[in-house]
Amino acid sequence: MSISDSSLRLHTLLIRPGSRWVSLDLRAIWEYRELLYFLTWRDIKVRYKQTLLGAAWAIIQPLTVMVVFSIFFGLLAKIPSDGLPYPIFAFCALLPWQLFAHALTESSHSLVANEKLITKIYFPRLIIPLSAVLAGLVDFVFAFIVFLGMMVYYGIMPGSAVWALPFFVLLSVMTALGAGLWLSALNVEYRDVRYTVPFITQVWLFISPVAYPTSLVPEPWRFLYSLNPMVGVIEGFRWALLGKVSLPGMPLAVSAGIAMLLLISGLFYFRRMEKTFADVV
Amino acid sequence: MSDVAIRVEGLSKRYRIGQRERYYTLRDTLMNAFKAPFGLFRANGKQSSILQDRDDTIWALKDVSFEVEQGEVVGIIGRNGAGKSTLLKILSRITEPTEGYAEVNGRVGSLLEVGTGFHPELTGRENIYLNGAILGMKKVEIDRRFDEIVAFAEVEKFIDTPVKHYSSGMYLRLAFSVAAHLEPEILLVDEVLAVGDAAFQKKCLGKMGDVAKRGRTVLFVSHNMFAVQGLCQRGLLLESGRIRLDSDAAAVIGTYLHLGVEKGGEVNCNFPEDAPGDERGRLKAVRVVSEWGVTGQIDISKEFSIEIDYWNLKPENRLLVSIHLHNGMGICVMTVSNLPSASLTPDAWYSRYYPIGLFRTACTIPGNLLNDGTYTVSVYVNENNLPRLLDSDNIVFVPHVLSFEVEDTGTMRREYTGKWLGVVRPMLAWQTVQIE
């Protein structure tokens, strides 16, 4: 029997009661990157097992919402859509929105759902919400393909701003992960979170410019409105893909700042609570 | 390089009672804050001193210190709740100690359960990779061991079938097989062998023995004294979170079997509401009775009885009484029950409907049957729904409630005076004839 080379040098590990202050220790995540890969892969593989329509759900959901929005908000309520056809205006926002809402929901429940792992084996706990968020990217890719079809249908060509798209994807993932870290850690101790998450996503949808353009919000309120990081993300998506609106400079800067704050505070809170997860979950 | 693999110094772990069972809702916290308005604002760091004063905390582990050298195989034994699992959980970093520290030199693999993270919807192949990654194996390692793992588990034909279609035996074999091919320098194992059939357990035990022989450090928690005896040179006996004895395996096992088990020949529960059982019936007493009366010492050549007193609390109940005897090695020597077909003298109450009341069932064990040594008595009282018997029919189950000593009084020692090997030492009929 041979042992892998890395295990030949002796690791010394000191286990002692932790201090209140924690380091983020992101190197540990890197060491466990294969586990992150396998858990993400598991979430993707398992998600649509034993469903009739399978991965089609990733497309059906945003499409249905788009149709409903187009009829009620676009056709009947005549909500402006920055001069774009309403369906593609709404769908362009639903792309990051669904990614965000899904990632937030999945990551919030992830620790409790993986209770067995947490109480039986050690690994950096961050891997769990992280893999839940990453698994949501697959649905995003499917929906994005449908979106490309719609672009062709409406004859819209993305401008040179499309290069910025990965940045906005990253920003929505960061926002979801930041909120997800807070909620998943809280969920370990307070099961209220289970009931709060659907409520949070619902309210969050209405305070984000998914069904309506940001231009509908009166100028003096714009700054306050932009404190919602999804405002920057959605406006960014419309700017990068549809090209009609101008670069949303101020809201974007504010949103990115808030997203960063949410993520970093979430990381620290998570790391602080992490050591009691196995005792409490 | 020091040759100490694990050094544990003053390790303690405190739990809030019920912490493992319940979770808090935000409302509870708010209510508590309402009751003690300043509690919410107190610095978190001070919480521990508040906890200390309250009596709803327990020390699952208290001031435990020991050292394990590289290559040592140590068995950790103790009754349920003695702190064995907590110790392993701290050493494998699942939970943090409250006080003290542990120093671990080497790559640790912990096996607190087989099949952690197995997903029923995934195939055997997929689960090997997933479970391997969870246990800390690198993908290249799993690739290299893959065929070995599958062969050991004997599931070649079903490797691409979702494991939810596996029989429980196949599932366990695959789960153990992945774990068995983990090759850390220090292995922490908890009760893994308590699952599966005898053949599978034997196979697992063999594999564990191989690991031990290859010079790895192993900490092995088990209730199976036979396994501990077979695998470990050294034993660590935990009692109520403290180390009671740290010695060679045989000595520790011997002490364990005498620990906490009543040796006076009788255990009594005087109050029905506290006694083992439920609303259908409760255990009152168990005793060992020889011709001289209640005793913990039995003459090897004399018959004796085990008496079980119990309350029947449900009218028109039919009951079934069984006894397990375990010897000092933890081997179940016999299971006996008052079934008519398994009785020398049929028990009239076996098929009768019990009214509410106090009953005594006695079983007589003949002399010259058991070998000398220590035995423990485990008692079952079941609702008699035979031929079908479900877990829910079990009213009373008290494992190792009582121990007694079978003493060699020399009746079989006139010609040969050494140790009689074997689980039993019966006197049998012998005859030799000349046939040619």
Image (cartoon, coloured by chain):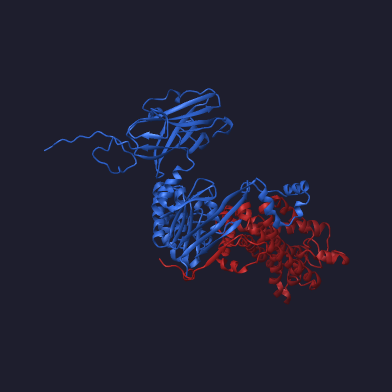
Chain colours: A red, B blue
Residue B96 visible at all: no
* Nearest to the observer: residue A105 or residue A2: A2
Rendering coords of residue B396 (x, y %): 51, 34
Rendering coords of residue B17 (x, y %): 63, 46
Figure quadrant of residue A155: bottom right
| Direction left: furthest residue | B436
In the image, taking residue B133 as reference, residue A276 lies left or right, namely: right
Rendering coords of residue B345 (x, y %): 37, 25
In the image, taking residue B346 as reference, residue A29 lies left or right, namely: right
Residue B407 visible at all: yes
Rendering coords of residue B348 (x, y %): 43, 23
> What residue is at 38 percent from the left and 54 percent from the top?
B206
> What residue is at 76 percent from the left and 72 percent from the top?
A243
Q: Vertically, is A247 above or below B325?
A: below
> What residue is at 36 percent from the left and 30 percent from the top?
B303
Query: How many discs appear?
Result: 0
* Nearest to the observer: residue B7 or residue B167: B7
Figure quadrant of residue B423: top left
* Nearest to the observer: residue B88 or residue A149: B88
In the image, taking residue A72 as reference, residue B119 lies left or right, namely: left
Q: Quadrant of the C terminus of chain B?
A: top left
